[in-house]
Image (spheres, rainbow, N blue to C red):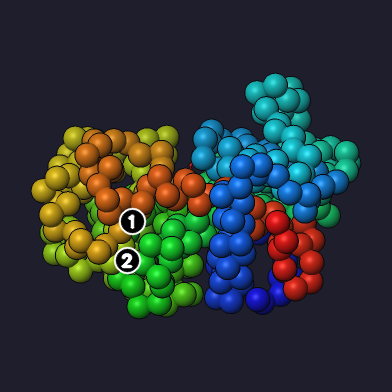
């Protein structure tokens, strides 16, 4: 297993392929705990983890919380609405204050791109990016890749079709970096207003017909329509989006039997995917959520001094 030298986990862009593989391999070890009746081991005893979420979250926040607790870290979940942020305290004062209390690691989600990077420079403790604006969501991409590898056995050479709001999606950006580093071929497809200009320079293809692209895909990655970031009307209505880009029973027939459908959640059921399609055997949406805990355990372990050779004993 490769060594890990980073203080922080801020983005996929700056990780090497072997570092991504290190996290995925470690995730497999962490998943062993799922089989146990008592899911607790002392690896991070004495370490303090603080969750600082300035945007709503269910999956990411809860999985970091469960991961920290299973590994015996002390966990503090800061409620922004009840904190001094509402009295005008700056983000950086909040972070410095939290670090001054002896925190070892801060997990931060923020609506502005670059906040985790700025915090990482300012603080001597570790920082994990739990999603920053439309920039990156590294642990989501890692759990997506882990799920793909678990179901299909590899990443190298797979054809991945990413459908939807590429423009606002931190998940798409992190997926593109991670999948490319591990040798997948990527096509993106969505309303032209939601495909960033010049995205081909990232080495991805831009598809124009869902009906043509679905049969070719090993993995269909659906993105959430981010109602909170649609400040301009990028498409006429959710109903029209569902009509043109949603995975419904008809389109499900175009997806190969051995292919995989993923979605980071939360799903807008009936928009990106119908409830029936979300329950199809090719859908890995629930499995992604399950794997989210193990991926975050692996990330916490690596950043909180999991040993020079990264040998995890659980
Ligand atoms: N996928 C994801 O980030 O979900 P949450 O917003 O619920 O954390």
Q: Position of residue 289 (x, y in %)?
A: 47, 46
Q: Is residue 246 visible?
A: no
Disc 1 target residue:
221
Q: Image quadrant for the N terminus?
A: bottom right
| Residue closest to the eye, 113 or 257 | 257
Task: Categorize mark 1 by other alpha carbons within 10 Å: few (<14), some (14-19), many (20+).
Answer: many
Which residue is found at the position 67% from the left and 28% from the top?
80
| Residue at the front extreme, as displayed | 37
| Helix, strand or loop at mark 1 | strand
Residue 229 point in image, percent of width and height: 42, 39
State yes or no: discs 2 and 1 in contact (Cβ < 8 Å).
yes
Please tell me which residue lies in front, 310 or 104: 310
Image quadrant assignment for residue 93:
top right
Residue that appears at 61% across and 42% down: 37
Q: Where residue 152 appears, x then y in whole percent?
A: 36, 67
Mark 2 sits on what residue?
160
> Vertically, is 300 above or below 156?
above
For residue 212, which numbered disc appears in the image? none
């Amino acid at each position: 297993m490769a060594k890990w030298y980073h203080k922080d986990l801020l983005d996929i862009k700056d990780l090497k392929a072997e570092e991504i593989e290190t996290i995925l391999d470690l995730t497999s070890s962490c998943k062993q705990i799922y089989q146990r009746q008592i899911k607790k081991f002392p690896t991070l005893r004495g370490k303090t983890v603080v969750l600082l979420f300035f945007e709503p979250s269910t999956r990411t926040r809860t999985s970091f919380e469960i991961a920290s607790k299973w590994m015996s870290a002390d966990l503090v979940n800061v409620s922004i609405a009840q904190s001094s942020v509402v009295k005008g305290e700056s983000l950086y004062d909040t972070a410095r204050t939290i670090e001054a209390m002896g925190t070892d690691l801060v997990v931060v989600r923020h609506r502005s791109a670059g906040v985790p990077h700025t915090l990482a420079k300012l603080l001597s403790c570790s920082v994990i990016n739990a999603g920053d604006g439309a920039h990156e969501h590294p642990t989501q991409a890692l759990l997506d890749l882990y799920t793909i590898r678990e179901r299909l056995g590899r990443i190298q050479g797979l054809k991945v079709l990413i459908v939807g709001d590429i423009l606002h999606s931190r998940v798409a950006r992190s997926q593109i970096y991670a999948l490319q580093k591990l040798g997948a071929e990527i096509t993106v497809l969505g309303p032209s207003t939601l495909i960033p200009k010049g995205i081909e320079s990232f080495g991805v293809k831009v598809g124009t017909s869902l009906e043509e692209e679905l049969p070719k895909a090993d993995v269909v990655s659906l993105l959430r329509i981010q109602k909170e970031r649609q400040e301009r009307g990028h498409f006429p209505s959710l109903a029209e989006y569902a009509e043109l880009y949603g995975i419904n029973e008809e389109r499900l027939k175009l997806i190969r039997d051995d292919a995989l459908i993923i979605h980071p959640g939360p799903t807008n059921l009936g928009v990106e995917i119908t409830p029936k399609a979300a329950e199809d055997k090719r859908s890995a949406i629930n499995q992604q959520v399950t794997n989210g805990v193990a991926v975050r355990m692996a990330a916490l372990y690596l950043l909180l001094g999991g040993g020079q050779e990264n040998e995890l004993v659980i």
